[in-house]
Image (cartoon, rainbow, N blue to C red):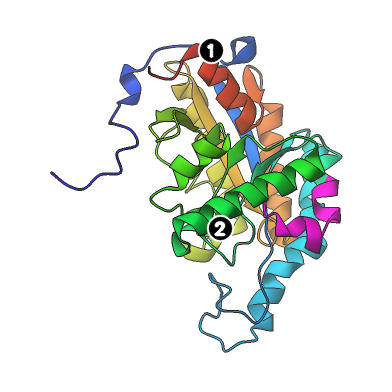
Amino acid sequence: MLPTHGRFGHSAITERPDFDWPGGARLAVYVAVNCEHYAYDDGETDLGWTPGLDQPDSYNYGWREYGNRVGAFRVAQTLERVGIRPTVLVNSEVYEHAPSVPAAFRALGAEFVAHGATNSMQPDEQTEDEERATIERVRRVVAEHEGAAPRGWMSPGANPSRVTEDLLAEAGFAYTLDWPVDDQPLWMTTRGGPLLSVPYPHEVNDLPAFVHHHQTAETFASMIVDSFAELREDAERQPLVLSVSLHTFLAGQPYRLRRVREALQHLRENGDGVWFTTPGAIAEHYASVVPAPS
């Protein structure tokens, strides 16, 4: 037998219980906006167009910081313009470094998902005690600023450790976005009780599209539109989730944002019977119709 994570077993999507999303919808759509902060002159900034530069690396740091100074506000304006409520994956350090960023999305009624403290520190680089302290601190900071504790978590760099899910359940989180394994939510087993995995995209995600695969803005927009069309058809057979992931320093670049806005506008204009929502609402509804296994 190959080693396994032990969090969930295999399940074919063709063999699941049928249900509807609220209002009889068959396809749920949410747009996640990653708002991140990186340390300056303290190790690799990672994912750079010019990796391996000596520190201080102002070039790659500045690329990311554009998102906190410009891109975030352009993305917020776009989502307001097309009428999609944002889901914000926020590093807790953003509240100290750039408080106007979460404020811009808060004004749009965003759901805030805890996204670690900073993308310069990832869970698989920490001890269990260090990670537990980080999760608790991040949850507390988001709650202090948003008036309620976040229900969802996304690890910085999408790099959970072997115990992240255990720690999340123990801390009171309801769901994670760390596992891009399905087009429906699924229940995960943890030592702290059941935890939901809500779909989050690896493919319809501007970071791998632009940074890893060197796609154009036009191609990324087509990915959004084509995924929407295909999943709408598939959703006639089973309820599904389409998530779109944006990063403020990537999708927030002007030449990309124009194409992204056109794609999102297409979704809204063809959204009859589609539930535009947030992962927290998806998790809550799914738990009500597919309860956690006892």
| Residue where numbered disc 2 is placed | 207
| Label 2 Cα neighbours within 10 Å, binned few <14 / some 14-19 / many ≥20 | many
Find residue 180 and report its image quarter: top left
Question: Is residue 172 in the magenta section?
Answer: no
Q: Earlier in the sequence, mark 1 or mark 2?
A: 1
Vertical side of 109 occupied by 220: above or below? below
Seen in the picture, residue 26 relative to 147 is either above or below; the reply is above
Taking the view exactly as shown, the residue that stands out farthest to the bottom is 54
- From the image, which quarter does the N terminus lie in? top left
Find residue 92 and report its horizontal and vertical position in percent.
Answer: 70, 54
Would residue 168 be found to the left or right of residue 276 on screen? left
Q: Look at 64% across and 83% down and name the residue there.
A: 57
| Residue linked to disc 1 | 20
Residue type of the residue flagged with mark 2: Leu
From the top left corner, tell me how far across and down residue 151 is, in percent: 63, 34
Residue in the picture at 38% in, 18% down = 293
Q: Which residues are magenta?
A: 89-104
Residue 5 position (above or below residue 29): below
Percent from the top left, x then y, of residue 193?
Answer: 44, 29
Q: Main secondary structure of the magenta part?
A: helix
Under circle 2, the secondary element is helix
In magenta stretch: residue 101: yes
Mark 1 crowdedness (10 Å alpha carbons): few <14, some 14-19, many ≥20: some
